[in-house]
Amino acid sequence: QVQLVESGGGLVQAGGSLRLSCAASGRTFSAGTMGWFRQAPGKEREFVAAISRSGGNTDYSDSVSGRFTISRDNTKNTVYLQMNSLKPEDTAVYYCAARSGLLLRTETYEYNYWGQGTQVTVSS
């Protein structure tokens, strides 16, 4: 089992920045791909970003590409999501996820473990 705990959410004005963190424990953290997803009220959970085990490969949704950056520190068992130029449409609960496989994936069903989520609210 892998336990994931997110932090760093909050309220920010449009154009501002936040950095989310996800601390992992349990099974060997570096075993696989990590990802961030988000879910806005009344909408399905959607892919935001993913990073490979080594950190050398990343993938982003079109809506955040160029504004968000995913990174990981395997020595600290932590993955980060740096969010810049935030927009009101980025408002959602952000979830950290982990999968046992090594390939980058964008679908929720391909991830085995999930955190409890952290709220990000962007005001206009």
Image: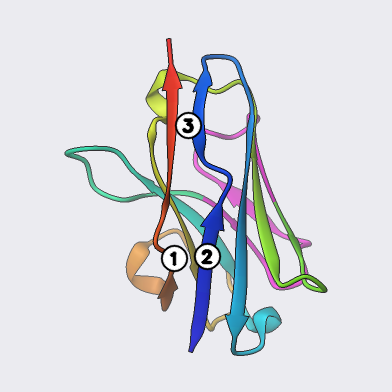
* Residue 66 forms part of the magenta stretch: yes
What residue type is disc 2 on?
Val
- Marks 1 & 2, CB-CB < 8 Å contact: yes
Does 108 sit left or right of 68 as displayed?
left
- Residue at image coords 53%, 83%: 100
Label 1, residues with CA under 10 Å away: few <14, some 14-19, many ≥20: some
The type of residue carrying mark 1 is Gly
Please provide percent x and percent y for residue 118. 44, 49
Q: What crowding class fits label 2: few (fewer than 14 Cα within 10 Å), some (14-19), or many (20 or more)?
A: some
Disc nearer the start of the sequence (1/2): 2
> Which disc is residue 96 wearing?
none
Tag 1 residue:
115
Q: Circle 2 sits in a helix, a strand or a loop, which is it?
A: strand
Give the percent coordinates (x, y) of residue 54. 77, 71
Q: What residue is pinned by disc 3?
A: 63
**Looking at the image, residue 113 lies above or below residue 94:** below
Q: Give the magenta part as a residue range.
A: 49-70
* Kind of element beneath mark 1: loop
In the rendered image, residue 62 lying in the magenta stretch gets the answer yes
Give the residue at x 38% y 62%: 107
Residue that numbered label 2 is attached to: 5
Q: Nearer the viewer, residue 70 or 80?
A: 80
Mark sitting earlier along the chain (1/3): 3
Other-residue count near label 3 (Cα within 10 Å), few / some / many at <14 / 14–19 / ≥20: few
C-alpha distance separating marks 1 and 2: 5 Å
